[in-house]
Amino acid sequence: MRGRPTASAAGPWESCARRGYDCCTQPGTRRRVLTSMTFPPRYPHAVDQAEEIRRNDWEAFSSLHEMGDHWVMKPWPKGASAYYWYLTFENDSLAAAANACQVALEEFDLRPVPTGCLHMTLLRVGPPDVVSNSMLERIITNAAEELGSTYQFQLDVGPLTGSAGAIRFSVTPWSPVLDLVEQLRRAQGIVLNTNSAKPQKDLRPHIGIAYSSARQPITKIRETVSELRTLAPVPTVVNAVKLVRLWRTETAYEWEEQASIPLRRAGPGRPPH
């Protein structure tokens, strides 16, 4: 754990050992999660209109003819790792919604994300052989300064949708997430002397709950997902940004938290936006 006064260390253990996973947030421990791929191909017309984002997500998923194998579609060099910025979600209602969807989809060849390990990938920093420890420390410091005046905000998670290799929740609105990414991009760009991170237009905020472990027919999967879309979106507050080191083992990703940067609490009369 590489902490700063404004980039606090992780708190007590949060166990999410489910379906054979062992996940916890204690500093220095490994946390196994799954990740996802950029989708849909078309950018929504409005990043703050929930119905437009949800419609765009569902139309793209509806256009697919099959589910692909996520682990084949997204190759990962053996032994490789990289630093990423994440949002994590410790929300009981969200965990319950994800679990309900995962149970309904159990008959398919999908690898579920443990509900205590739900996350959103924001931005890639780089591999350890490029980003040294001292560079990482400077990035954390810069990010803490950038985010020092950024308030916590609320996201609505859901309804359920999917991509070519995953099942996921739509997330709205996008603006606060995109703003956060731009701040992090500036923070690391000063240190890395580059703006080579994934372009803003390539980011599709979402939260994955299961990943396809085989090339498989999509019709019945999509019918089940369609039925699950009646579940109401879950409001959740984003109160911190995490820097993690991510790597892959077989059909899972593992990550180790490096720092947690808190966002400002909303004051009286200023609810999370």
Image: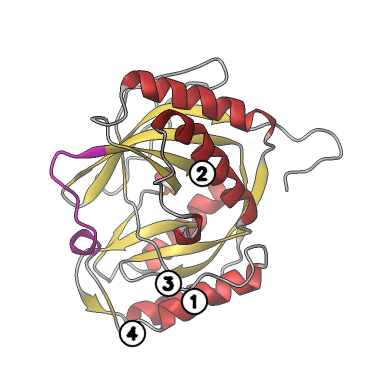
Taking the spot 33% from the left edge, 84% from the top edge, the residue there is 219
Foreground: disc 1 or disc 4: 1
Question: Residue 3's spot in the image, x, y percent?
Answer: 46, 18
Callout 2: few (<14), some (14-19), or many (20+) C-alpha neighbours within 10 Å?
A: many
Asked if disc 3 and disc 4 are in contact, CB closer than 8 Å, the reply is: no
- Considering the numbered disc 4 on the image, is that residue within a helix, a strand or a loop? helix
Q: CA distance from mark 4 to mark 2?
A: 30 Å
Q: What amino acid is found at the position of numbered circle 1 in the picture?
A: Trp
- Upstream in sequence: badge 1 or badge 2: 1
Asked if disc 1 and disc 4 are in contact, CB closer than 8 Å, the reply is: no
Name the residue that disc number 3 marks: 41
User: Left or right: where does residue 178 sit relative to residue 118?
Assistant: right
Callout 4: few (<14), some (14-19), or many (20+) C-alpha neighbours within 10 Å?
A: some
Name the residue that disc number 2 marks: 89
Taking the spot 67% from the left edge, 62% from the top edge, the residue there is 48
Q: Residue furthest right?
A: 269
Name the quarter where the N terminus is drawn: top left
Q: Residue furthest left?
A: 78
> In the image, which residues are magenta?
70-81
- Upstream in sequence: badge 2 or badge 3: 3
